[in-house]
Image (cartoon, rainbow, N blue to C red):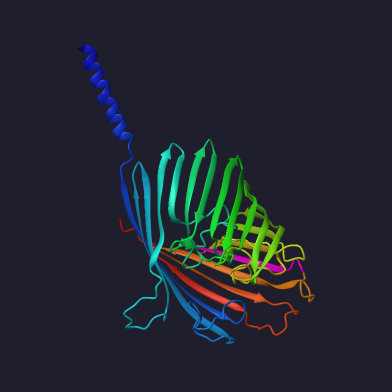
Amino acid sequence: MKFTKSLLIAAFAFSSVANAQEEKPSFSLTGEFRPRTELGGSGGPFTASPATPGGSTAPVGSESFIKTSVRAALNATYKNDSYTLYLGVQEVFFYGDRTQISATGNGNLRFQEAWANINLFEGGSLKVGRQPLSYDDQRILGGLGWAQQARTHDAAVFKYSNDGYNLDLGGSLNTYAGTIYPSATLFSYRDMGFLRINKTYGSLNISLLGLVTTHQAGTENKSTIKTAGAHLDYKTGAFTASANAYLQNGNRNVGGADVTIDGAYLASLDLGYKLDKVTFGLGYETISGKTDDSAAFFPLYGTNHKFNGLMDRFYVGNHGNAGGLNDLNASVSSKIAGAAVSLKYHNFSEVEDLDGTGSELGSELDLVVAKGFKGFKLVGGYSQFFEPDSIVGAKDTQNWAWLMLIIKPKFL
């Protein structure tokens, strides 16, 4: 009897502890409202026709444009012991993209994210659905948060963490109405697989990434791009350093022709040093260009706006199989009157002088100011691009200014 009583007490105690350790289900509802107005002079990709979705209010060849785009989002998260479910509804629109009394929308209201992360065992989970793939400095895989629409993948990713190691193994197969989705361009794919392994050793953080993408459009012909490399971050005291090294092989479609990729490369090194309240930076990136033996390297699904100047002159829907790029840059950042202020200078040149006019591609100066207020944030900037003398017929007013309001309320 005493044994039975003791057993019941022990079972009750164990049950109480187990219930206490169970994670209580939680639900949150957040939003985002992010309008951004941009004003630019001629040059770059900025003088799009107003007939183009997301285009400007000035025709091609005009001296300047002004446009306002908006991201409006509502995000719901439910979490319990078994899984996390995330649903994000988003609309991206431009001022004036529909008439004031239109009975229909612009077709941009959609589930930007819809995924479930299922807990399989301790340290292991499977994340399935429409989700961002964003790693390290976002050079190869990034969420593209600057773009109002951002970037997501319809994918499944197995995640495992143990003893400081982080492993992500994922893939995607894009289909439409039962057929392989037409995706010959670099900016989409028929199928994709990747493996990322990450580990921190004291002050050094190392990530290894392998990515394979297959592209096919309406025929039996397909191309495969294989990208592999490493990202490193190092920090000690006031000094920071980060580096990228990637190789690309395979083949890709360029203008309807199949072109070999053989030993294309991207390499970069960025150094930073904080002196009192001012941080100084110095960086260099080189990206291989087109040669007789190989197509150029292309940084596939990263946040390319973050690199090579904010005016998006390189690798943002452009410069895809050109002479490559050398980017030597220097920056300084600090806080002034409670605002984060940064100034960065880039000097650009080609790796391969394809047209024989010289390798200079110009230089760019980017100023960004960010200030937080109670409940919202303002971010703005000004950029100026300086064309080299070798560019014939270049406009003098190659500048760009922007102002963005960010509000992220938490409803529940």
Q: Quadrant of residue 141?
A: bottom right
Q: Is residue 284 visible?
A: yes
Residue 177: x and y in percent read: 43, 64
Q: Nearer the viewer, residue 44 or 112?
A: 112
Quadrant occupied by the N terminus:
top left
Relative placement, left or right, of 363 versus 173 is: right
Q: Is residue 411 above or below residue 348?
A: above
Q: Is residue 46 left or right of residue 12?
A: right
Q: Residue furthest left?
A: 1
- Above or below residue 158? Residue 409 is below
- Residue 123 on the magenta span: no
Picture quadrant of residue 3: top left
Image-quadrant location for residue 142: bottom right
In the image, taking residue 324 as reference, residue 211 lies left or right, namely left
Q: Residue 208 in the image: x percent, y percent?
A: 61, 47
Which image quadrant: the C terminus? bottom left
Magenta span has 348? Answer: yes
Q: Position of residue 288 (x, y in %)?
A: 72, 62
Residue located 57% across and 52% down the image: 136
What main secondary structure does the magenta stretch of the protein show? strand
The magenta stretch spans which residues? 337-352
Q: Residue at x 37, y 83 (%)?
A: 99
Q: Is residue 286 visible?
A: no
Q: Position of residue 364 (x, y in %)?
A: 65, 71
